[in-house]
Image (cartoon, rainbow, N blue to C red):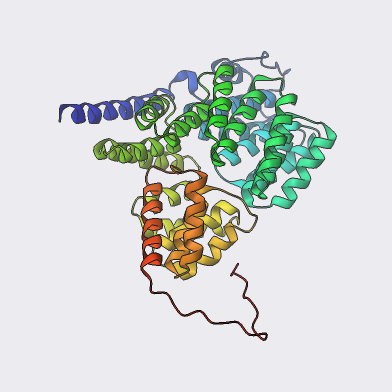
Amino acid sequence: MRTRLLIVVGTFMTALAMTLGMVLYFGRDNYTPPPSPPRALDHGPIVLAPPNASIGQLQDHLRKQPRDYEGWARLGVSLIERGHDTVDHTLYTQADRALANSLRIEPDYNDVALRGRARLAYLRNDFTGALDWTDRALSVNARDESSNLLRIDSLISLGHYDEALLAAKELHAMDPSAGSVIRLARLSELDGDAARAKVLLAHAGELATAKADKLQVFTAQGDLALRQGDFTAATAAYREARRTDPAYPPAVAGTAQTLYAQGKLATAIRWYRDLAQRVPEPEYVAELGDLYTAAGKNVSAASQYDVVSTWQAIAAENGVRVTMDLANFAADHGKHSLALRLAKAEWKKRQSIEVADAVAWALHVSGKDKEALPYANRAARTGYKDATLLYHRGMIERGVGNTARARALLTQALRLNPRFSPVQAPLAREALAELKKSTSTAKPTKATKPTKAMKPTKPSA
């Protein structure tokens, strides 16, 4: 009982520390001056901000030089990255104002601010807006790699896979880089060709020289191996990423997931707990909660789920669309009507594999398997192999009475990764056991001898 109380108190103090941290961000060093009329009051020469200026230095500079549009753009970009790294979504609002100031002064030839707008839209899950802003940035600087990569990412998120593939090939032909090859690998995996994705990621590793590129390559290799059930390769790839940067959150999260997949629940919890305390990203906090659930620590799990809900509210207040994240979280944690409403709202904006799966799963948990099946088929249309998606489709097939197909899909999901989810994998095993039991106890029917006029039927798609 004392241990449980300490867990609750510790979680409360963590949440309090995060809240105080947000309050402190509104101090002088993070204050963004209000918009100033461009070109109106000061007609003197513009002094540019020094290179590599910090956020505080840029803010001090812009109070004296409010017409420095490049300074405003750099401040906006810096605030975006600070907000992303610290999961402080309030900084996105400040970045929005800074970028607006920059574009108010120079709306046309300002690719840094335009790219910043694209990045901000993408992080806010506004992928249509991100695509529009990247197109504007590329109209100013067509060869900018960051804008091109962000455009490809936006197309993938929107489900425009063919267009994304063409853009990635064009970028690679123009200037081969680790970033373009990583996108080509992801598109190959989404198309059902994991073997080609593995080869492409190896090539991306040969091209990676910068630290950021190496981190992305190693983490992508780990993610691919984990999804394919190759836990040894996943462990090795994430280890290389952590050698490059021991604190890199995606690599730390991947390591924790691999540890759980290998049956090391207590160790996985320690890794995720340390990560969630340092980087309280809702995804990491939710996964920690699921691990606590698997360990039977329901009070600790509930406290993590409360933190997720709090952060989602803060994110929404600062312009972040949380519909997909919240839909998946709600579907797996008993809020079925909310999950269905949010998933369908997201489907109106983009028709990617992940959104199709979210709609299908929300319909399933709402008891609407017949409606869910077309969405599940849509999620499987490219041949992409993922244990969670296979499990979702298997449960939906079971719900409509397609027992043979349900058994095959659940078997495939658990073969790919027996512990793909701390909460859902046990349910998959239970469902599969019930399907096998019902099949073995069913009375055999008399075989019908086929005639020449009869043709074997093909399995349904």
Residue found 55% across the figure and 66% down from its top: 374
Residue found 50% across the figure and 47% down from its top: 415
Instruction: State the image coordinates of residue 250 (x, y, percent, origin top left).
Output: 53, 30
Q: Is residue 376 above or below residue 237?
A: below
Corner quadrant of residue 15: top left
Instruction: State the image coordinates of residue 192 (x, y, percent, origin top left).
Output: 65, 50
Residue found 54% across the figure and 30% down from its top: 232
- Depth check: 25 or 297 in front? 297
- Depth check: 36 or 401 in front? 401
Instruction: State the image coordinates of residue 111 (x, y, percent, origin top left).
Output: 73, 33
Looking at the image, the residue that sits furthest to the left is 1
Corner quadrant of residue 63: top right
Quarter of the image with the N terminus is top left
Quarter of the image with the C terminus is bottom right
Q: Is residue 147 visible?
A: no
Asked if residue 404 lies left or right of residue 191, the reply is left
- Depth check: 377 or 104 in front? 377
Residue found 70% across the figure and 29% down from its top: 39
Q: Is residue 445 above or below residue 164?
A: below
How many numbered markers are drawn?
A: 0
Asked if residue 6 lies left or right of residue 219, the reply is left
Q: Is residue 220 visible?
A: yes
Instruction: State the image coordinates of residue 46 (x, y, percent, origin top left).
Output: 71, 19
Asked if residue 377 lies left or right of residue 179, the reply is left
